[in-house]
Amino acid sequence: MVQRQLDLLQDEYKQLQEERDNAAKEEVLHKQQTEMVQSRLDLLQEEYEKLQEERDNAVKEEVLHKQETIIVQRRLDLLLVEYKKLKEERDKAVEEAEKLRGSGGHRSHLAFSEFFPLELEQATENFSNWHKIGEGGFGSVYKGFLRNTMVAIKMLQPQSLQGKPEFEQEVAVLSTMRHPNLVTLIGICSEKSALIYEYLPNGSLEDRLACQGGTPPLTWQVRTRIIGEICRALLFLHSNPNPVVHGDLKPANILLDANLVSKLSDFGISRLLMEKNTNTLVYRTEYPRGTFAYIDPEFLRCGELTVKSDVYSFGIIILRLLTGNPPINIAADVEDAIETDSLHLIVDESAGDWPFVQAKQLVNLGLRCAQVRRRKRPDLENEWKLVESLMQTASLSVSPSFKSQLDEKGIPSYFTCPIFQEVMKDPHVAADGYTYEAEAIKGWLDSGHGTSPMTNLPLPHQELTPNYALRSAIQEWLLMHP
């Protein structure tokens, strides 16, 4: 019986031992599973944190991108608004140019030549720097010999938004007007947006005030005459029922010919005044254009351009010619000199001995024109008698060099035919580069001469080219000096 109990105990022991072994195996498996699960959890945790970081970065980038998108869109919207306004201005300028072409009176449409691009390239040796005589925001100006005439070729920038209307505007103004003190437009090259003018060898008034290239200072007599010529040109521009305002009057846009006669140029931003406001013709814009120190302060403030805007610029130019000083704050400096009775200290001595009365009258005129308030500026019509008398006084003491360019009747010598010694009616340019009366040079050639009447050198050919620019200048001069 005891043995039976022992057997039972032994069986129970084996069973328990087996259960223990099975439990141990299960514990190992459970531990392995736990470790595997933990490892998987660790990987998932790492992946979760990585994804969370990527999400946060993506959110940040999205916010930044959204902000950048908003900024770019705002800039695009502003540029679009500006583009539309500039386009409206361009269209308005072109429309004004067309109206100006059709305006009547003494501003009829005048003939000018159309040149080919190849001609311009040949005249300037493919627009070499050696031929370049000027450069600005509008483009470049080249000197060239074109169809037997020395010319200045102004190349505008057609790719700019303002290039085309400026080209149209300048053609419209200069093709409908002729005046001795406006630069003469000889022709255009539509394909290249080029303007071809008479060549004026003495450069700009700005250059001469700076004595660029070692040129001698302008005398007070010449400066007084130039003031009168500018005044006369402005009266001509402003005299139409729909006046033309130059809009960018400054010494750099006033050119001087061989006799130091001044001519207004650069009419690209000029305006034909059409609107009426309290009996004043105005042009309105949100984008006033011009040159700092010469631009009308009221035009800058309210965007209204009138003939009095040119009067302001004219006043600054008068003060510059008197003092030789830079334009910034020049009116205030001159006023201070008057108040301290030291006007003689700021008058440009390089111009010679200014007569005191003459200088004082010009100073007062300059200051009246350069008033900040438009309503205080004078009408040039009311000032012309004074200006004309000052010109006449200056001409009585004109320098010998200038006198030599006029005959005993006061006629510019280059108006006279070298053969007939009479004022030309139909000037033509010969192969030697000189201009003659058509009848005279044709008679010379028909009589068998193959040489120049001026140099006695052989002529390369016997072709003649009408000098329309000189003919127009002579006709205008004769009208003003009957």
Image (tube, helix red, strand yellow):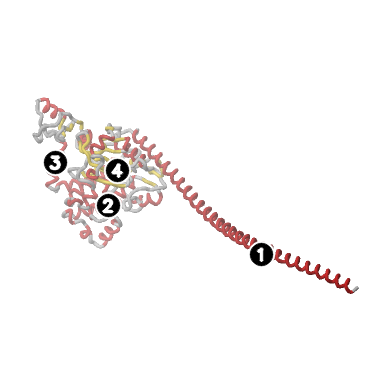
Q: Earlier in the sequence, mark 1 or mark 2?
A: 1
Q: Secondary structure at mark 1?
A: helix
Mark 2 to mark 3 CA distance (whole Å): 29 Å
> Is label 1 in contact with label 2 (beta carbons under 8 Å)?
no
Looking at the rendered structure, the kind of residue marked 1 is Glu
Q: Secondary structure at mark 2?
A: helix
Mark 3 is surrounded, within 10 Å at the Cα level, by few (under 14), some (14 to 19) or many (20 or more) other residues, namely some
Mark 1 to mark 4 CA distance (whole Å): 89 Å
Q: Which mark is residue 366?
A: 2
Number of the front mark, 1 or 4: 1
Mark 1 to mark 2 CA distance (whole Å): 99 Å
Mark 2 to mark 4 CA distance (whole Å): 23 Å
Instruction: Look at the image and tell me in which quarter the C terminus lies.
Output: top left
Looking at the rendered structure, the kind of residue marked 2 is Gly
> Is label 2 in contact with label 3 (beta carbons under 8 Å)?
no
Residue 465 on image: x %, y %: 20, 31
**Is there any visible trace of residue 219 in the rendered image?**
no
- Mark 1 sits on what residue? 35
Q: Nearer the viewer, residue 73 or 468?
A: 73
Q: Nearer the viewer, residue 80 or 88?
A: 80
Q: Earlier in the sequence, mark 1 or mark 4?
A: 1
The answer to whether 343 is drawn above or below residue 126 in the figure is below
- Mark 3 sits on what residue? 406
- Mark 4 sits on what residue? 266
